[in-house]
């Protein structure tokens, strides 16, 4: 299964990810490395906004392949995840054939349940990707129902899908599968066993600063440091929604746009919405005193 | 972090040594209750084949990704890894004992205590209700069904237990068989319709419908086990235990001055066993009540993973709260928009002349979707229509 295009060791994964702007530590890079080489799905868990989805995108860029994304939600079914027949087109075909006078049932059945009438949804198109293994991102899998999870289980072990009217579709190139979960519910043991597991937590200050540096090179070093420090201390508070790395980046970008050379109380107050996304949280931070937080971060 | 070849040569000279070591490590983890089977072991060996083995960091990260399947296991992994691959002084044997914290003697005494609490309180009431007992002759079952839990004499407890179990089973069966006709739920299934009507040349003579499968809701139950609820707690526990069979997901908590999760215990099939387990650790049994702060704990710790729009929240309490009323109101308010329904079951509501006048109850009422009695078995059965 050696693929010459894939990185040769985890260190190479770190470097190559770095080159496309994704900061990964060695442990995460190892998981990604194994995902690419062992063909096992990778399950990423962790709080929101720490770059779970981003990793899939970065891997797709790294492998120079397509990213196919399936966003899960409650009630997601096979028709929107795997395939669907194009009913309107089928009806039209039946009508047209009638108009032309021919009427052979058997041939009709064969015709209207053929490739031409098939609408590929993410999972099927991931299996039938012709050029090379795509990266398949199954996002927020914890939101889907248990039934769908069971279906995924089957798909992820054999990489084939059966369409009753058409036959079995076997993966031409096994997709690299990345699953993400925000842990709104516990996933089944069976699914977890099929996957590599990696927990992405919040990065430490140094790493986070590196991320800001990578993603927003225009931001001054000092401003980046202050922003990161401030977000780090916000994460210590009992907030209902702790700010993730995505929020840090948003915030830094906002400060850049507002042309603030450094973080002061007024600026913090004005741009609080970038990091704190609920009034309760904002209230709580105000009560603790913006200045306290700032002196801890800036000083 | 030193990453050298020394690491490899120290432990294994050849490839086969490494294979043996990895297999040994998998077996070691299995003994630590990790779910590591043959498939995982093979994957671990495969990982060793493809990666740079001379780096200890790689081996560690690779095996962690392959062999762990939860955050907890992730956290346990590093010390175990070090213990196996870098054996220092032998670890204290004590660790093994920690896994079975149950002291058989302790279990017995504590179990006795809470059961005794229950029995003795029932004993007191039995004197008052001896007359009732003699009147109730005709149909014991029918009577028991409607008797307030608090006035049931000790001698009838056994029968009541049985009846509770039977009725709970009945409730369970009725709930799962129930279907509601609804004009909105059927939608035409184009897939089915076209397939079926091919024989008529595609003319839609027969329509196929599809119906949204009704989803079982989830349930989160809070049972008050403070002193004032003493006579009811045990029945409610049994009731909760019976309920869990037909909810997609059920989580349970006991609360008094603090919150105790019991979801795991409720999952045990046989009830007496899970009761025994509850008795093992419940220190808060029969003390005061602080509903508000308990719910607050729930919101900070558990709500994210347990609540969904299809969840029913069930609170079983008499509302005698020693905490601040507005704290309770605020915490109940937080369920708004997150769950399908908040139901409060109050055993006192069935008592003649009872008014929910306590400050706590008053503060709670505006945030509760249904406020119902739960003083006898019949009232619990009536709950069905609210699920």
Image (cartoon, coloured by chain):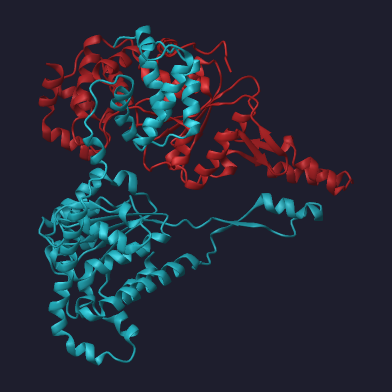
Chain colours: A red, B cyan
Q: Nearer the viewer, residue B237 or B15?
A: B15
Q: Is residue B236 above or below residue B160?
A: above
Q: Position of residue A254 (x, y in %)?
A: 29, 21
Q: Nearer the viewer, residue A254 or B141?
A: B141
The residue drawn where x is 38% and y is 42% is: A186
In this picture, residue B56 sits left or right of residue A64:
left
Q: Position of residue B116 (x, y in %)?
A: 16, 68
Q: Position of residue A135 (x, y in %)?
A: 53, 24
Point out the image quarter for the N terminus of chain A: top right
In which quarter of the view is residue B376 placed?
A: bottom left
Tell me if I can see residue A260 in this picture. no
In which quarter of the view is residue B206 placed?
A: bottom right
In this picture, residue A38 sits left or right of residue B336:
right
In this picture, residue B54 sits left or right of residue B127:
right
Total labels: the figure holds: 0
Q: Nearer the viewer, residue A43 or A287?
A: A43
Point out the image quarter for the C terminus of chain A: top left
In which quarter of the view is residue B371 placed?
A: bottom left
């Amino acid at each position: 299964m050696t693929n010459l295009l894939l990185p040769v060791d985890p260190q190479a994964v770190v470097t190559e990810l770095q080159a496309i702007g994704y900061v990964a530590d060695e442990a995460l890079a190892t998981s990604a490395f194994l995902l690419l080489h062992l063909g096992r799905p990778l399950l990423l868990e962790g709080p929101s906004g720490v770059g779970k989805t981003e990793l899939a995108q970065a891997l797709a860029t790294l492998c120079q392949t397509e990213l196919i994304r399936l966003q899960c939600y409650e009630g997601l079914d096979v028709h929107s995840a795997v395939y669907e027949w194009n009913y309107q087109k089928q009806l039209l075909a039946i009508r047209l054939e009638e108009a032309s006078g021919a009427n052979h049932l058997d041939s009709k059945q064969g015709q209207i349940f053929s490739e031409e009438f098939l609408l590929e949804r993410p999972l099927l198109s991931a299996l039938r990707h012709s050029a090379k293994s795509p990266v398949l991102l199954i996002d927020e899998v914890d939101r889907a129902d248990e039934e769908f999870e069971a279906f995924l289980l089957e798909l992820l072990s054999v990489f084939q899908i059966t369409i009753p009217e058409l036959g079995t579709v076997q993966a031409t190139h096994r997709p690299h599968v990345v699953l993400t979960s925000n842990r709104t519910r516990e996933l089944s043991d069976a699914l977890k066993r099929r996957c590599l597991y990696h927990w992405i937590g919040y990065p430490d200050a140094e790493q986070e600063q590196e991320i800001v540096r990578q993603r927003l090179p225009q931001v001054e070093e000092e401003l980046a440091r202050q922003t990161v420090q401030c977000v780090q201390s916000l994460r210590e508070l009992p907030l209902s929604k702790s700010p993730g790395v995505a929020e840090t980046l948003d915030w830094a970008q906002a400060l850049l746009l507002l042309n603030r050379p450094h973080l002061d109380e007024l600026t913090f107050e004005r741009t609080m919405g970038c990091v704190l996304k609920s009034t309760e949280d904002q209230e709580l931070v105000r009560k603790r005193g913006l200045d306290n937080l700032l002196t801890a971060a800036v000083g | 972090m030193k990453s050298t070849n020394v690491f490899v040569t120290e432990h294994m000279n050849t490839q086969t040594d490494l294979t043996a070591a990895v297999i040994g490590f998998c077996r070691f983890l299995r003994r630590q209750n990790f779910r590591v089977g043959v498939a995982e072991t093979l994957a671990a060996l495969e990982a060793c084949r493809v990666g740079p083995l001379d780096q200890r960091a790689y081996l560690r990260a690779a095996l962690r990704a392959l062999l762990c399947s939860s955050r907890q296991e992730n956290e346990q992994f590093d010390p175990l890894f070090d213990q196996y691959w870098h054996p220092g002084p032998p670890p204290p044997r004590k660790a093994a004992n920690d896994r079975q914290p149950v002291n058989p003697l302790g279990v017995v005494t504590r179990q006795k205590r809470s059961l005794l609490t229950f029995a003795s309180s029932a004993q007191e009431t039995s004197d008052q209700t001896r007359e009732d007992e003699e009147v109730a002759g005709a149909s014991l079952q029918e009577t028991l069904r409607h008797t307030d839990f608090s006035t049931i004499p000790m001698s009838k407890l056994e029968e009541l237990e049985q009846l509770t179990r039977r009725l709970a089973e009945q409730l369970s069966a009725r709930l799962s068989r129930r279907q509601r006709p609804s004009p909105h739920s059927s939608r035409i299934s184009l897939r089915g319709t076209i397939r079926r009507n091919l024989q008529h040349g595609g003319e839609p003579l027969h329509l196929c419908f599809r119906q949204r499968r009704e989803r079982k809701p989830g349930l989160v139950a809070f049972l008050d086990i403070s002193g004032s609820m003493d006579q009811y707690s045990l029945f409610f526990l049994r009731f909760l235990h019976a309920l869990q069979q037909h909810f997609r997901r059920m989580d349970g908590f006991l609360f008094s001055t603090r919150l105790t999760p019991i979801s795991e215990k409720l999952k045990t099939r046989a009830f007496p066993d899970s009761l025994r387990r509850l008795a093992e650790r419940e220190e808060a049994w029969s003390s005061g009540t602080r509903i508000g702060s308990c719910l607050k704990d729930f919101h900070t710790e558990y709500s994210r993973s347990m609540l969904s729009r299809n969840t029913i929240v069930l609170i079983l309490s008499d509302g005698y709260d020693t905490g601040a009323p507005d704290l309770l109101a605020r915490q109940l308010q937080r369920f708004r928009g997150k769950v399908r329904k908040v139901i409060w079951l109050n055993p006192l509501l069935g008592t003649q002349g009872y008014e929910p006048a306590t400050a706590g109850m008053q503060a709670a009422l505006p945030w509760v979707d249904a406020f119902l009695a739960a003083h006898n078995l019949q009232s619990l059965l009536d709950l069905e229509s609210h699920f």
